[in-house]
């Protein structure tokens, strides 16, 4: 499994989280197990929060 998610207020950029999402899909060979699906869902939420933060900072 990858590094633990940092949760709300994550300091990781959207690009960093996106890289982890891509790595997860590569490791999984394009088909996620239940555990990988749960990890993916958390990463997507973290990625969306990072994107939102980056948009707010840019405004």
Image: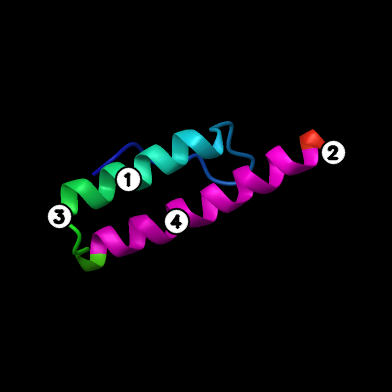
Q: Which mark is residue 42?
A: 4
Question: Of the residues under marks 3 and 2, which one precedes in the sequence?
Answer: 3
Answer left or right for 12 relative to 9.
Answer: left
Left or right: 5 in relation to 53: left
Picture coordinates of residue 29 (x, y %)? 14, 55
Identify which residue is drawn at 44% across, 56% down: 42
Residue on which the image places disc 2: 59
Of helix, strand and loop, which one carries label 4?
Answer: helix
Sequence-earlier tag: 4 or 3: 3
Give the structural element (helix, strand or loop) at label 3.
loop
The residue indicated by pointer 3 is: 29
Magenta: main secondary structure: helix
Horizontal and vertical percent for residue 33? 19, 65
Q: Residues within 10 Å of mark 4 (few under 14, many from 20)?
A: some
Question: Who comes first in sequence, dot 1 or dot 2?
Answer: 1
Q: Earlier in the sequence, mark 1 or mark 3?
A: 1
Residue 11 in the image: x percent, y percent?
Answer: 58, 31
From this view, report whether residue 29 is shown above or below residue 34.
above
Q: What's the distance in space between the residues labelled 3 and 2, CA to CA?
A: 38 Å
- Between the C-alphas of marks 2 and 4, the distance is 26 Å
Q: Which residues are magenta?
A: 35-56
- Quadrant for the C terminus, please: top right
**Extreme right residue here?**
59
Indicate the quadrant containing the N terminus: top left, top right, bottom left or bottom right. Answer: top left
Assess whether mark 2 and mark 1 are in contact (beta carbons under 8 angstroms).
no
């Amino acid at each position: 499994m990858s590094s633990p998610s940092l949760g709300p207020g994550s300091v990781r950029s959207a690009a960093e989280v996106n890289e982890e999402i891509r790595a997860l899909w590569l490791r999984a060979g394009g088909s996620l197990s239940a555990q990988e699906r749960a990890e993916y869902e958390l990463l997507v939420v973290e990625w969306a929060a990072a994107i939102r933060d980056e948009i707010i900072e840019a405004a």
